[in-house]
Image (cartoon, rainbow, N blue to C red):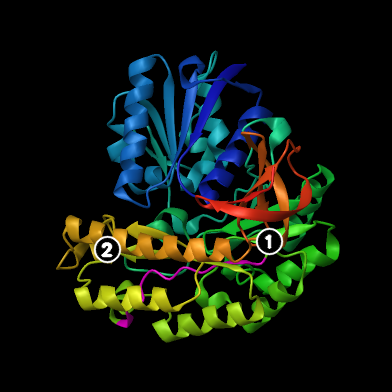
Amino acid sequence: MGTYFLENFGCRATQADGAAIERQLLDRGLTRAVSPGQAEVVVLNTCTVTASADQDVRSAIRRIHRNNPGTRILVTGCYAQRAPEEISALPGVSLVVGNSHKHALADYAVPLTSGGGFVPLSRVGAAAEANIVIGDIFAHTELMAAPVFDGDDASDKTRPNLKVQDGCNNRCSFCIIPFVRGRSRSLSLEHVVRDTNDLVGRGYREIVLSGINLGRWGRDLTPRSNFAAMLRAILDNTSIEKLRISSVEPMDWTGELIELVASSPRIAKHAHVPLQSGSDTVLRRMHRKYRPWHYADRIERIRRAMPDAAIGADVMVGFPGESDEEFEQTSALIERLPFTYLHVFTYSSRPGTPSAEMLNQVPVHVARERNRVLREIAAAKKQEFLRSFIGRDLEALTLSRRFEGHTEALTDNYLKVRVGGEHPPNHFVTVKADRVVGNELVTIA
């Protein structure tokens, strides 16, 4: 019927949205092209969390249009919801579909292929202007979900990512996500269990649970539930061998959740707990709902319950008004806490957020230097954690990557291991690390 190419930008949630879009397009009879240049319609599923994310999308649009002016470009996702007019003005863009109507994206993509004509926008209740389809994201109740896989080849796919929650009810002053994804919405427990069992039936051993604000799962359901209850339901009603939890906010790492993760051998010993800043005054300006001492207490409780767990965090530097003293408070807290890795970001102003209007924006060169300092601290902590496992037996899941007589694998506590020899992906192996090379453990070949 027609050909498409899909390109995703950004986070796990965007990747999961893209998988659901792809399933829509295939179900409607379209065929995936091997490259944008061979597709009748190219769907760009976008991110807008930083200015560089926006720039990546604009660059992709220009490249695709330059290489194949006849290709129809359809832009959807978070950037499309935030700035549709900006995108629609770019040469080559045929249609912009916001997150508010992404659940019906196939209705717009199929007519852009051979033999099609535009579907009247009124058919899906869109408020349309020119080539823009967008609506009130806070009225949006759909939750798109389809598994996303690590591997590039169908035979090598491992560790599917299952999105069980979307949207966010928080209003952090730097974050545009609630305004482009809407309110927190949970996948029903029945749907979560069904999808997990489906993945188990297809042979997958480890599943990664993800969401925009994952720890809020269940708060919007009737009857009301919570994230720990969902985990217990998966453990009780499926035979999945390993569950891995992606990012969960510090206030959602309850005693119940910590105890459950620590006690179950089927849940990976891995806690990713966003920090953003270790300064009380910066956290207040960010409108974060915890203080540094609350955060430290949660991390210390996780470490006591799981001595070998991977513990990571997102940290932002260069937030408006961040003084030298406030940055030192952040670096001191990071030095003190038992992190095993960090994701360090430099603040990026997002139009429409309160922080974009704040005074005392931090100079770029200062923010970059602070970024470097925290990355060095994180690198040292990572190396110390890796070295502590030399000579110890570790269980790891083999991945699809192979190189130099080794197969890459991932341990329960989120360490990459080069396992000697050729091993098929998606198998649990017990290994003993011999040394550290870069950011990986290496077994004896």
Q: Is residue 322 left or right of residue 63?
A: left
Q: Are marks 2 and 1 in contact (CB under 8 Å)?
A: no
Residue drawn at x 72%, y 65% is 267
Closer to us: 411 or 161 = 411
Q: Is residue 258 left or right of residue 140?
A: right
> Which image quadrant: the N terminus?
top right
Residue type marked 1: Gly
- Is residue 441 magenta-colored? no
> Which image quadrant: the C terminus?
top right
- C-alpha gap between disc 2 and disc 1: 35 Å
Q: Position of residue 187 (x, y in %)?
A: 66, 58
Local SS, label 2: helix
Q: Earlier in the sequence, mark 2 or mark 1?
A: 2
Examine the rendered structure and indicate whether residue 362 appears above or below residue 68.
below
> Is residue 291 at all visible to an observer of this figure?
no
- Is residue 275 magenta-colored? yes
Which mark lies nearer to you, 2 or 1? 1
Closer to us: 344 or 194 = 344
Residue drawn at x 31%, y 63% is 373
Residue type marked 2: Arg
Segment tinted magenta in the rendering: 269-280
The residue carrying pointer 2 sits among few (fewer than 14), some (14 to 19) or many (20 or more) residues within 10 Å by Cα, namely many
State the image quarter where residue 404 is shown: top right
Local SS, label 1: loop
Closer to us: 68 or 89 = 68
Q: Position of residue 122 (x, y in %)?
A: 48, 37
State the image quarter where residue 408 is shown: top right
Question: In the rendered image, which residue does mark 2 sit on?
Answer: 370
Which is the main secondary structure of the residues drawn in magenta? loop
Please count the marks in the image. 2
The residue carrying pointer 1 sits among few (fewer than 14), some (14 to 19) or many (20 or more) residues within 10 Å by Cα, namely few
Question: In the rendered image, which residue does mark 1 sit on?
Answer: 391
